[in-house]
Amino acid sequence: MNVATCNNCGYRHTDVTSLAAHEPVALSAKITTLNDLKIRVIKSATATISIPEFGAAITPGPHSEGYISNVEGVLERVEDALMFMLGSVKGKKLVKGERILKRIKTAKQRKPNFTLVLKDPLGNSALVSPQPSKIRKRKLARAELGKLKFGQYAFAQTQRSSFQEALP
């Protein structure tokens, strides 16, 4: 993990990086209790997080940062982004956004019922729970990699590995 801090202005940049690429992975956890909000989320700079029930997705960009948080922290990031977007919309979009915001607050305060999905084409992310059975893990399919940002790098890595294994 890399942390850079400016003592003058208080700016802080945190990033989680790995020097190795691993198998492309899809992780998910069904969040149904307040205790599930404590599940640790380790998101690499290449990972995409989604919460289908809220229509939310956090996709990596060219300067994306990795971070370590928990499910509640991810909800707060989604909530902050949604509140920012609601400042510039009107009509049906505003009503829909406010409805989603209310569902997020309800999930954080008393009754969570959603799925957190983390897809990492380079396999450097993780979900960590005291109840390992809460976490579902599977290899990302090639078709999924094609739809993910940075997925082409995982495909290239897989091709290199296969080529190297074929060498005498």
Image (cartoon, rainbow, N blue to C red):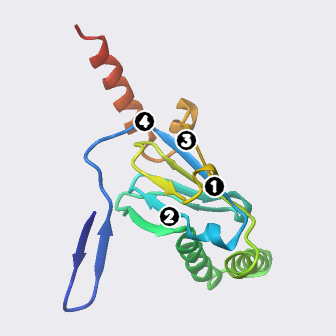
Q: Quadrant of residue 88?
A: bottom right
Indicate left or right for 152 with 9 as reference. Answer: right
Residue found 73% across the figure and 65% down from its top: 32
Indicate left or right for 128 with 96 as reference. Answer: left
Q: Determine whether the residue tagged by mark 3 lies in a helix, strand or loop.
A: helix
Q: Determine whether the residue tagged by mark 1 lies in a helix, strand or loop.
A: strand
Indicate left or right for 7 with 128 as reference. Answer: left
Q: Which mark is residue 29?
A: 1
Q: Quadrant of the N terminus?
A: bottom left
- Spatial CA distance of label 2 from label 4 is 20 Å
* Residue ID for mark 2: 40
Q: Determine whether the residue tagged by mark 2 lies in a helix, strand or loop.
A: strand
| 72, above or below 23, in the image | below
First-in-chain label (1 vs 2): 1
Q: Are marks 4 and 1 in contact (CB under 8 Å)?
A: no
First-in-chain label (2 vs 4): 4
Q: Determine whether the residue tagged by mark 4 lies in a helix, strand or loop.
A: loop
The furthest residue to the front: 130
| 61, above or below 10, in the image | above
Could you tell me the amino acid type at mark 4?
Answer: Glu
Q: Which of labels 2 and 4 is toward the front? A: 2
- Spatial CA distance of label 1 from label 2 is 11 Å
* Residue ID for mark 4: 23
* Residue ID for mark 3: 147
Q: Quadrant of residue 51?
A: bottom right
